[in-house]
Image: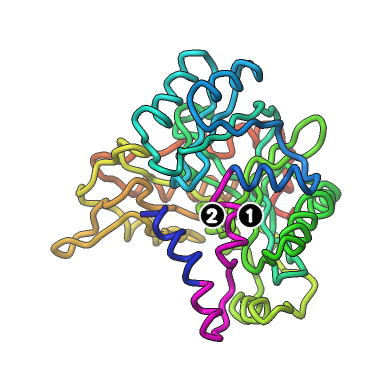
Amino acid sequence: RAHYRRRFTQVLVDEFQARGLRVFGPRKAAAELEGSKVFAKEFFARHGIPTAEFVVAHDRPEAERAAAAFGLPVVLKADGLAAGKGVAIAQSAEQVAEALDLFFGERRFGTAGDRIVIERHLTGEEVSFFALADGARLLPLATARDYKRLLDDDRGPNTGGMGSHSPSGLLTAEQGADILETILYPTLAGLAEENRAFTGVLYAGLMLTEEGPKVLEYNTRCGDPECQALMLRLEDDLLPILAAGAAGNFGISRLHFRKEASAVIVLASEGYPDKPERGDPIEGLEAAGQHPNVVVFHAGTAEREGQVVAAGGRVLGVAATGVELADALRSAYAATQEISWQAMRYRKDIGRRLLSRLEPGLGARA
């Protein structure tokens, strides 16, 4: 469903513009930055945007040669949209073979896997960096961090995201300015140069390596659960800013965010991300929502005979704010304890490793 929503959104922006209607979002040509991993990597190469070394493979033998040349671990990515699940980080030859079985044998991702990107594995800390774009200017959002792996300690398969917090706790103001200068503005300028002027949300997934920040991927939209964490901190009225951006000029130079931190715990159903269990009644929503500074976001839910039931993979996002990141996480996890359904699963370590090495005061940083 996520795949088709993104495809529909891309077409919708073009249709709005063809009818003379104002819309804040990228045209299909600009959204290819997310829609095709091959396009994105080749775009980075054309415009000198730092990213991992890569090879584009059109069949299994070509992919096997590229993976062998890079060594282990190695990253394999489906070219097209795959609902956040088309990436494999192979730690062994067996895992490389399993990933290639999914891409070329089972055709798990359909035409999205006709071509795949093989790239050198990067080490460091992963961080999300968001900005709003009006075609020529950027308004950076506060920083956020997403936790992609399904299981605690960053184990298990990649997902659409199992939790997030803002601020990320990883970027200084100087690093943020460097990312804008070396990655986001060159991306915006490169798209304009290629007649793909970008209006909308530009969301860079970055790896902070010893050589500096490098792009893992771009999304051309807000990504949850990070968006949930960010919107809890935003002070500005978003609608007039987006309307001005759709007209081609934000008219302001920066966004304003509250000093407190925010955190989101994703509650998923067993079987996610492949075959999540559905239909279980969910208990405790009202009690969770009564916790101070807590908001429960619905994602994969439905109502049946007056009862809210689990109807998707990522079912709920339990979000909270707090003076410090530790406070926000504590509140989010406390509210999470109120909620239950038979197949409920969630990570219990969101932010834990970061908090173990940070001094107090994180809630006052961007």
State the residue position of label 1.
203
Tag 1 and tag 2, C-beta contact below 8 Å: yes
Quarter of the rendering occupied by the N terminus: bottom left
- 18 drawn magenta: yes
Q: Looking at the rendering, which quadrant does residue 241 occupy?
A: bottom right
Q: Nearer the viewer, residue 308 or 115?
A: 115
Q: Is residue 188 above or below residue 68?
A: below
Bounds of the magenta segment: 13-37
State the residue position of label 2.
223
Q: Is residue 89 left or right of residue 362?
A: left
Q: Identify the secondary structure beneath mark 2.
A: loop
Image point (77%, 41%), residue name: 50
Residue 248 placement (x, y as % from top left): 71, 78
Amino acid tagged 1 = Tyr
Image point (22%, 62%), residue name: 303
Residue 74 placement (x, y as % from top left): 60, 23
Measured in 3D between alpha carbons, the distance from the residue under mark 1 to the one under mark 2, in whole angstroms, is 8 Å
Q: Is residue 179 visible?
A: yes
Q: Looking at the rendering, which quadrant does residue 187 occupy?
A: bottom right
